[in-house]
Amino acid sequence: EPEVTQTPSHQVTQMGQEVILRCVPISNHLYFYWYRQILGQKVEFLVSFYNNEISEKSEIFDDQFSVERPDGSNFTLKIRSTKLEDSAMYFCASNPTGVGANVLTFGAGSRLTVL
Amino acid sequence: AQSVTQLGSHVSVSEGALVLLRCNYSSSVPPYLFWYVQYPNQGLQLLLKYTTGATLVKGINGFEAEFKKSETSFHLTKPSAHMSDAAEYFCAVSIMNRDDKIIFGKGTRLHILP
């Protein structure tokens, strides 16, 4: 069964450093998403991406965050200058068409620890 | 804007007992509703979804949920709990919009007692 792949599974970084989290969505999917889950809290929507541009973003997704689809397969989330409160599990998801009752398929997540 | 409320951050049931995890939603338009499960140190896995049609939806691992519009609820049930059901369960809502973004509830951790 096709799956969404995320790397790294766990990254530890110093506060102020840049971090790039990578995702390989399912190959024929067109809509891509990033969610995050701070330890013990709910899964929060960050951003959706379609046709090489951001479709929607939440209040959490400030100027420190950016997303990119640099080639035909990868979808990345960059945090320019990490803060302690960025420590969380980050989930990537993809969706075939983005309209209708399609189900997002999630990756296993990338755990980011900011020291 | 749509939202979901999950009652009870922790629920404990005995093995073999009924599992009931509560979810209420808020949406100004007919919603799509989902239950996702997260096993320890793993990602989010879809249990079941409601879109249109039959209001009782069956999912994987013996779980089912019933959409009740009058109560704005989508509670998750399983007749007989198994030890392997111990996990975090998230109710989620979506509407037919431009990008199918879904909004999650805060989650309910299910503990199974031997």
Image (spheres, coloured by chain):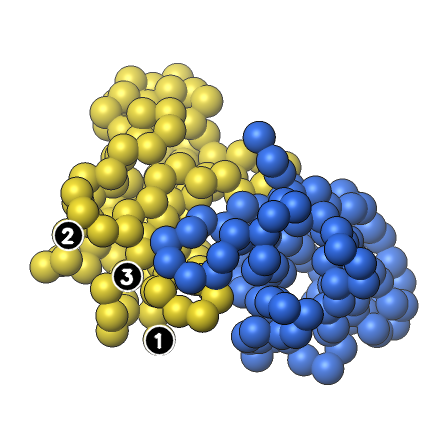
The chain holding disc 3 is: B
Res A68 quadrant in image: bottom right
Q: From mark 1 to mark 2, how far is it between C-alphas?
A: 19 Å
**Helix, strand, or loop for circle 3?**
loop
Which chain is assigned yellow? Answer: B
Using a 10 Å C-alpha cutoff, classify the residue at mark 1 as few (fewer than 14 neighbours), some (14 to 19) or many (20 or more).
few
**Helix, strand, or loop for circle 1?**
loop
Identity of the amino acid at label 2?
Lys
- Furthest residue to the left? B70
Tag 1 and tag 2, C-beta contact below 8 Å: no
**Helix, strand, or loop for circle 2?**
strand
- Residue B18, above or below A90: above
Relative horizontal placement of residue B5, taking residue B83 as reference (left or right): left
Percent position (x, y) of residue A31? Answer: 57, 60
The residue identified by callout 2 is B68
Which comes sooner in the sequence, label 1 or label 3? Answer: 1
Q: From mark 3 to mark 2, how far is it between C-alphas?
A: 11 Å
Relative horizontal placement of residue B102, taking residue A77 as reference (left or right): left
Percent position (x, y) of residue B30? Answer: 23, 64
Percent position (x, y) of residue B32? Answer: 31, 56
- Can the viewer see residue B108 in this picture? no
The chain holding disc 1 is: B
- Residue A47, above or below B60: below
What's the residue at 62%, 38% (across, down)?
A3
The residue identified by callout 3 is B31
Q: From mark 1 to mark 3, how far is it between C-alphas?
A: 11 Å
Which comes sooner in the sequence, label 3 or label 2? Answer: 3
What's the residue at 28%, 48% (across, down)?
B50
Using a 10 Å C-alpha cutoff, classify the residue at mark 3 as few (fewer than 14 neighbours), some (14 to 19) or many (20 or more).
many
Which chain is assigned blue? Answer: A
